[in-house]
Structure formats: structure tokens, C-alpha cells
Image (cartoon, rainbow, N blue to C red):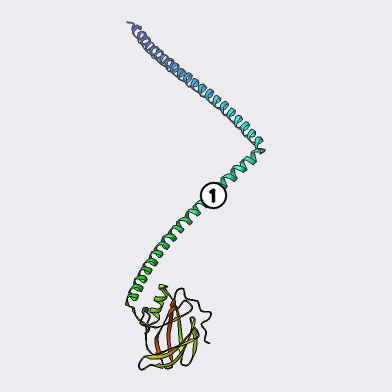
Amino acid sequence: MDETPEVPVQRSYSGLFMGALAVAVICAIAGLVWSYRLASRLTTAEAQVASAQQQNAKLASALEQTNARLKVTTETLGQSLGMTQKQLEKKAEDLLARQQADAKQLQATQRQISSVSNDVSGVKTDVGGVKTDLGNTKTQLQTDEAAMTAMKGDLGLQSGLIATNGKELDILKHKGDRNYYEFTLGRNQKQAVATVALELKKADTKHSKFTLVVYADDKAIQKKDRNLDEPIQFYTGKDHMLYELVVNSIDKNQIKGYIATPKNAPVPVTTSGE
């Protein structure tokens, strides 16, 4: 009976062992390489951390030095001013509050200036309107004055402008060339007007005529049957000044008018009736 040879089986086991051993070697080598790289990275990281720590330490030291210097400077300043740290802080707070209050006051002042500027603009507009009204009034006065007439008086002398109503008399007063004294005179009533006295003797409403007596310089001057709006002239005073009398309204037993005197004529003491 033949025996089976055992050599091939042993060779097969040896090949497997060698293969496993090769894989283990490769894995060990790979593990060594990975461990080396990891250790290198850890070393680099540790160096960076150490450098950062050194920088932080330097910064912390510099900060401490700066704080110390600042504290010394603050204390020195406080001592030189005779103030503590709290007092300095309070002073700074007060200064800030004052600046804020000044800023608010400045804003309020600016608003007031703006308001005043608007008011000034409004006033300028009003002044412009007033100027326009004055110009129109002046033009109207000139027109009314041109419509008034000048004529010769009863003494044959050229009279000034004659006012036939209150409006025209106001225009003459506004001109300021002469003094004007208005009067209302009843019949047989002697009344002081300007520096003379007047007495009405007759008023004829139908024919618009009147008769009156002028008392001047201790003389009685009769003006008989004079017409409405007729300039009645007479001289009076030591300087022989020419006065003009105009009657522009005749009613029953009453006349109304005015006396015009030179600008330098004496001023009457009273205009009440005698």
C-alpha cells in the first residue's frame, strides 16, 4: 500500500505565513510613517502655541506697564490739581453734560435765528406793501392837489390853493406850506380864530353868500356879500402878514370854513369864543 507525500501541504502553510508577515511589516512601516508625521505636526503646533503664549505674555506685560503709567499720570494730574480720581471723573462728566447743554442751547438759538429770519422776511414784505401804499397815497394826493384851484382873493392878490371840503383841507395841511385854522361860526357870534376874531352878520343859503366882520389889530373889517369858496384876504400883525379866509359851507345862520396864515405867523393863544 502506497503512502501519500506531505511536502506540498507544508509548502502551502509556509507561503501563507510569509504573506501575512509581509502585510504586517508594511502596516508597521505605514504606522511608523503616520506616527512620525503626527509627531512632527504636534511639535509644530506646540511651537506655535508657545510662540503665541510668549506674545501674549509680552502684550500683557506692556499693558500692565501702560496701565501703571496711566495710573501714575492720572494720580500726578490729580495731585497737581488737588483732585482725586473720582473728582476727575466727576469733572469730566460735568464737562460732558455742559457741552451737551451748550449744544442744545445752540440748536435752540439756531431755531430762534431761523424764526427771526422768517419774521424779518415777513416784515420786509410788509414794508414793501407799506411803501407801495405810500406811493399810491402820494400819487393820489398829487392828483387831488392838481384838481384843486388857485384864484385871486377879494384884495386882487393871487391866492394859494383853495380847499372846498374837508378832504382838500387835509391835503393842504399835509403840504405844510401854511397854518390852517378851521371854524364853525353862528350868526351874531364873535369867535376868536387864529390871531383874529370873526362875527357872522348874514348867511344867504339861496345865493351862497355871506357877510362877516373881521376884527384884527383893533380894527373891524367888514366883508360883505362874499361868495362860497371865495378867498377873503386881509393884513394883520406888526409884520403886515396876509391872511386868507375861505368859507366852504353855508347853512341857515351858520357858516363853516378856515383861515390860512403864513407859516411864520404868530401862534394864537386860544381858539375859544370871546
Residue 58 at what x, y percent from top left?
A: 55, 24
Image check: 219 left or right of 142?
right
Label 1 environment density (alpha carbons within 10 Å; few <14, some 14–19, many ≥20): few
Please identify the quarter of the rendering in which residue 224 is found: bottom left
Looking at the rendered structure, the number of numbered marks drawn on it comes to 1
Q: Identify whether 14 is placed above or below 138.
A: above
Q: Residue at x 46, y 84 (%)?
A: 183
Q: Identify whether 48 is placed above or below 222.
A: above
Residue 274 at what x, y percent from top left?
A: 53, 87
Most foreground residue, 244 or 240: 240
Q: Identify whether 5 is placed above or below 105.
A: above
Element under disc 1: helix
Q: Residue at x 64, y 41 (%)?
A: 87
Residue 227 at what x, y percent from top left?
A: 36, 88
Q: Identify whether 3 is placed above or below 191.
A: above
What amino acid type is highlighted by mark number 1?
Asp
Most foreground residue, 115 or 189: 189
The quadrant of the rendering that contains the N terminus is top left
Residue position for label 1: 102
Most foreground residue, 103 or 197: 197
Q: Residue at x 39, y 67 (%)?
A: 130
Please identify the quarter of the rendering in which residue 69 is found: top right
Q: Residue at x 49, y 52 (%)?
A: 107
Residue 114 at what x, y percent from top left?
A: 45, 56
